[in-house]
Image (tube, rainbow, N blue to C red):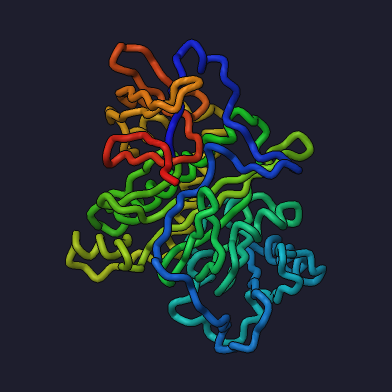
Amino acid sequence: MSFKLTRLFRFLVLRPPPIAFVGIKYPLSISLSSDYNCCNKPLSITTSVMGDSSLSAPLLVLCGKTSAEKELARSLKDNSNLKLPETPLISVMLHSEIDKPVEEDQFQIDLFLRSLSTTRFGRLLLWSPLLSSTHDVVSHNFSELPIGAVCVADFQSKGRGRSKNVWESPKGCLLFSFTMQMEDGRIVPLVQYVASLSMTEAIKDICVRNGLPNIDVRIKWPNDLYLNGLKVGGILCTSTYRSKKFNVSAGIGLNVDNKKPTTCLNSVLQELTSTSFQIRKEELLATFFNKFETLFDLFISEGFKPLEDLYYKTWLHSGQRVIVQEKEKDDDQLTEIVATIQGLTSSGYLLAVDESGQMCELHPDGNSFDFFKGLVKRKMS
């Protein structure tokens, strides 16, 4: 990801980062996913659900926290409302209809629901052992699902990342997408920061509750999660505008329990403590929603300002010096400008000061931001 350098007097009147509106093919420019790739090889998995490998259609298991959500799950199943792009057939069943024990490495729905204490988020759950993409499920069925509905998959075969990168998702990763709705388009691009912060806070909360050392997961702007200098997760947010509201589909992938090819939460946890405690994906997802609902409500009522201090304590960039490579007008020659990151602007871009003392705003343009080398540069072809 590279940036264009914009002087302070210009960015004061800039519009918010563009949104992906209905009928327009481009995604949220500032809210694209991490290109997090936790496996070097493509997946080759045969769908096998509760011992049945004969299923040719994707399976979705529906369940709810209370009787109201359970009734909605039944209605979705009975009315065959759920669809997937490029998939004519979906197999849908209720959690109560599963007559075989769920395998140990599959998502434990009951554990998740017991740990959940929200009033909106996560209360209707769609789970699948194998999907092309959880994001496709929630975005394609947004109008059929309640706000806060979540889709979880044990594996993804066609997960989406930034710049059309493939998001490969092997066993041990927490993979989910959920729905939310917003009215103020100016703050829609900032919601990915709330999601990132909610996940890091959820990890901290689990460690504190269990008397464990903190697993220091940090945020790499705008949408990656890093642990010990290695990427372990990322965020994807897309939006459509309908009936004066922004329908936002948010997806998160996080490596909880897969040691290869880099690292994962439980590997680092084992290095920090002698206990045998393992973070469970189900408990982490529930804790994430418990945190997110609180932070999201604060964000909607007061904006991102009340969350800034906590965000800056969690991200990797305060005081970071970067070299901005910028093309001169009508010239292919690159000019390098050194700038120091100060924080975020009101529209969610990076705020920096250059060597002459002038304030700058750094915008993403779809290229690469190598913050470990302190270089903002164009992606090489």
| Residue 314 seen from this side | no
Q: Residue at x 53, y 59 (%)?
A: 176
Question: Looking at the picture, how far across and down is residue 310, in whole percent?
Answer: 36, 35
Residue most extreme to the right: 79
Task: Give the image quarter of residue 320.
Answer: top left
Question: Does 44 sit above or below residue 262?
Answer: below
Quadrant housing the N terminus: top left
Position of 230 with respect to 32 (left or right) is left
Q: Residue at x 40, y 39 (%)?
A: 221
Position of 71 with respect to 281 (left or right) is right
Question: Looking at the picture, how far across and down is residue 259, in whole percent?
Answer: 31, 67
Question: Looking at the picture, how far across and down is residue 271, in whole percent?
Answer: 19, 62
Q: Residue at x 31, y 30 (%)?
A: 322
| Residue 32 seen from this side | yes
Question: Looking at the picture, how far across and down is residue 220, in whole percent?
Answer: 37, 42
Q: Which of the two residues, 69 or 181, is positioned nearer the viewer here?
A: 181
* Labels in figure, total: 0
Question: Does 153 sit above or below residue 10?
Answer: below
Q: Which of the two residues, 110 or 218, is positioned nearer the viewer here?
A: 218
Q: Residue at x 45, y 14 (%)?
A: 8
Q: Which of the two residues, 145 or 349, is positioned nearer the viewer here?
A: 349
Task: Give the image quarter of residue 51.
Answer: bottom right
